[in-house]
Amino acid sequence: MIQISNIEKRFGEVTALNKVSLSVPRGELFGLIGPDGAGKTTLFRIISSLMIPDAGEAKVAGLDVVKDYVAIRRLVGYMPGRFSLYQDLSVLENLSFFASIFKTTIDENYDLIRDIYVQIEPFKHRPAGKLSGGMKQKLALCCALVHKPELLILDEPTTGVDAVSRIEFWDILRRLKDLGITIIVSTPYMDEASLCERIALIQEGRLMSIDTPEVVAGSFPHSLFAVKTNNFFLLLNHLREWKEALSAYSFGEYVHFTPGTEQITERAICDFLKEKGHTEIQVNKTKPTVEDSFMSLMLKKQNQNAS
Amino acid sequence: MKAFIKKELFHIFRDYRTMLILFGMPVVQVLIFGYAITNEIKDAKVAILDQSGDVLSSRFVSKLTASGYFEVDRTLDHPSQIEPAFREGRVKQVIVIPSGFGTDFGLQKQVTIQILGDASDPNTANMLKTYTMAILNDFQMQELGKQSLPVDVKVEPLMFYNPELKGVYMFVPGTMAIILMLVSAMMTSISIAREKELGTMEVLLVSPLRPWQIIIGKVIPYVALSFINALLILSLGWFVFGVPIIGSKGFLLIEVLLFIIMSLSLGIFISTISPTQQVAMLLSMFALMLPTILLSGFIFPVENMPTVLQWLSNLMPSRWFIIIVRDIMLKGSGIAYLWKETMIIFGMTLFFIGLSIVNFKLRLD
């Protein structure tokens, strides 16, 4: 569905995308994971024909994003990162407006949006600007879906949305995928990565790893310990200052600690922390997640840059 | 397209500020220009220093007040009171009648009357002086009867097209130019810039809508609203101030429509170069409003400007529009006389449409 090879995009001095290559088969739910400013939005804008790459080639359904942009714009449903509907129009007015600019009607593709639309239907006469964050995103999704696109491009759809709505939103995405729609979605939340079929980690305009969430998580090259004591703040500092440490960062209520060598065991960590005066010490070997992989990739890159 | 226009109308009618600018402003502006900002003199306050105090001098004073242009605010007793009177600010002119005015006049000697004006407002001072002199001339004729000069050259001015020199005749075309410019150019540029600012332009661009469809959809509601505005101004002029429309009303409306389209294309051009509503607004204000008011000949006659500004004023679409409207309304001119001005506006329209097409972006920067 999407073929991208060696895309580059610069804004003045800043390189937003650096030789990005990517391919997404038809019907996949693909996630682009990375922090703010990593280049996610730029990549999505190039795919949706809103921007021209400085170098490289991008194709959507075999159509070139630069030359065949008119045809692409019919196939694509695009939901920008910022809420981009008319705030002074009601839910229903927004939806029928977007239906009509795609020369269709709400009724025609109602099957596709029904599951989502029923949730916002009670507010259909309310101005879109007065909806809650989750409702806004559902409406925006309806508007992007109303013309039955083959490819759905969602730029950070869950940013600023409460936890419950985020879960609901991902349920919806999985259902849409089952209907055969290719979906690419970006998110800064690592925990959403495991909900995609395949993910790409992006950092400073470079794709670092593209694979299934399991493989990406499994690619973590070291052993990993979840550590918890009575003093979280000192724990983080002590572990970071330890000569055996490769990395330590907070992960929920735990600190995820990676030792520099494989010789370090739970026992050794425990002893070290006791020595530093910690009590209620818990140390468990844990399975790496996508976030751990991401942190380790980032760390590796920083070290490369430093040396 | 229909949906687009409908959506645009929703935007306009739901925003009370837009509505206020659209329909409140024309009415207020016409009324302000019609009533307040006028060059006509009415009941100007004068002070009289009558050192003669005879029958003739009081006859002159009453002739002065009977004209309706002047009102005697006070009578002074001594020249030293003149300055304080001006300082107070109420008195705009002081007329000094010398002692022995009546006697000398009777003896057919040279008589001098002194007119002192408050030139801190030069236009008014000048005008009051002219009015006073005219009344004085009249008074002289009347008092001397036929025994005056052996050869008598009488000047009988007759003002064509606006015999009473009513300011409002001038202000209706001018106000129309300002309002249409404002509504059309500023409102469209702001509303397009708003789509950019709020990110909705991104969604519109990704849709199969072609750029010209987006633009036409944006513009049509404003064409209609501007046209209604023009009708509103014309009827206000007609019913409230009695400004006539001598020429063809159809031709006038066609010219109005042309000017509206010109302003809209200017507005679209502005929106293509402004990223936010604020920039669009400032650009329209400074690039359009001020020149329209100052350089179009609406308030200051173009003939009196320095050459550079005269040349600049040629670039003001409203300058030509004001000429067209004034000539149609007051002189009844037709296309035979106004084709040149019409072509200029038409040319400007094409120019701005071309510029907008070149500038309109199919994509984001």
Image (spheres, helix red, strand yellow):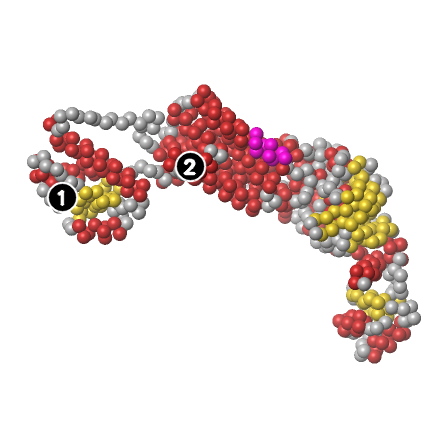
Left or right of residue A111: residue B311: left
In magenta, the rendered stretch is B350-358
Element type at marker 1? loop
Q: Is residue B229 something one can see in this rendering?
A: no
Q: With respect to residue B82, does B162 lie above or below?
A: above
Q: Is residue A71 something one can see in this rendering?
A: yes
Q: Which mark is residue B358?
A: none
Q: Nearer the viewer, residue B36 or B262?
A: B262
Residue type of the residue flagged with mark 2 = Thr
Residue type of the residue flagged with mark 1 = Pro
Label 1 crowd bin: few (<14), some (14–19), many (20+), radius 10 Å: some
| Residue lying at 42% horizontally and 37% vertically, measured from the top left | B307
Residue highlighted by disc 1: B98
Q: Quarter of the image holding residue B155?
A: top left
Question: Which residue is farthest top?
Answer: B336
Image spot of residue A193 (x, y percent): 82, 53
Element type at marker 2? helix
Left or right of residue B35: residue A221: right
| Residue lying at 83% horizontally and 54% vertically, measured from the top left | A208
Left or right of residue B145: residue B326: right
Question: Which residue is farthest front?
Answer: B307
Label 1 chain ID = B
Residue highlighted by disc 2: B307
Label 2 chain ID = B
The quarter of the rendered structure image containing the C terminus of chain A is bottom right
Image spot of residue B229 (x, y percent): 48, 33
